Amino acid sequence: MSDYPIHMEVKPLVEAFFDPATNTISYVVSDPDSKSCAVIDSVMDINYAAGRITYDHADKMIAFIEKNNLKLEWLIETHVHADHLSAAPYIQEKLGGKIGIGENITIVQDTFGKVFNEGTEFQRDGSQFDKLFGEGDTYKIGTMDAFTMHTPGHTPACMVHVIGNVAFTGDTLFMPDGGSARADFPGGDAGELYDSIQKVLALPDDMRLFMCHDYGPNGRDIQWETSVGDEKAHNIHVGGGKTKEQFVKFRTERDATLALPDLIIPSLQVNMRAGEVPSDENGNQVLKVPVNGL
């Protein structure tokens, strides 16, 4: 783990925004020394049945950034989400910044470009994004150094972003009593997910971890922050020294019982385009529903 440029002395400011419709937590992470900031995993609101898109959640983040006189430099997507739509282009239009995702977005685009019969006009090279991150890439948020960890298993393009003493895990991990995310989507793999989680758990014990989702297991209040040490000791799926074989068996059996996320069809089409809603030949925003395609 010494290969990663860890700076535990750097302490970013983190503001969380919970979206109850999708149980997603988005973040504004800011540099106290420069007022620069990044948005992590933003949410665009959709009434799927009515075909209506709104931006209440994104507007709250924009208002926070403007109120605190922050400068938005990055809009980070930890992966192509299957359960909520990204508001990155909407926020970018208002505040600027660059949209970034893991370089294996190209695998996701190729897979779901076929599922949704997107044709040759849909680019599968990640060019919809401003930056494609690889394993161990570094970038700056003001004076703060950030780096990426490639953590496949939930999806091929999953990335954990580490900024000072905080890490944003995406769906690689949930809170200790929530365990881990599913690994049965196309390109997912339970064994890879276990290995990716072990990479995260090799970070310093006092590294602060911020989740992308929380579902309040057993009726507890929604939570989104834990630590590497707590996950290692208490995570119900991987903590306490559980083996890879135990995890793969459990994860595979559990995933077989799970229904698809309610918003998977619109989410994949929008998020593989960096948050842009697809349009037909007349410029009308449209979403496809493949029959027996997922």
Image (cartoon, grey):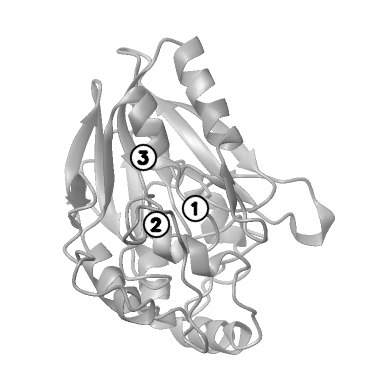
Residue 254 lies left or right of residue 132; in this view the side is right
Residue 11: x %, y % from top left: 40, 25
Neighbours of disc 1 within 10 Å: few (<14), some (14-19), many (20+): many
Secondary structure, mark 2, is helix
Location of mark 2 (residue):
271
Secondary structure, mark 1, is loop
- Name the residue: 48% across, 24% down: 62
Alpha carbon separation for disc pair 2 and 1: 6 Å
The foreground one among 98 and 184 is 98
The foreground one among 196 and 85 is 85
Give the image quarter of residue 185: bottom left
- Name the residue: 55% across, 61% down: 83
The single residue placed furthest to the right in the displayed view is 219
Location of mark 1 (residue):
85
In the image, is residue 38 above or below residue 117? above
Q: Are marks 2 and 1 in contact (CB under 8 Å)?
A: yes
Numbered marks: total: 3
In the image, is residue 54 above or below residue 126? above
Residue 294 lies left or right of residue 98; in this view the side is right
For marks 3 and 2, the one nearer the N-term is: 3
Alpha carbon separation for disc pair 3 and 1: 11 Å
Location of mark 3 (residue):
89
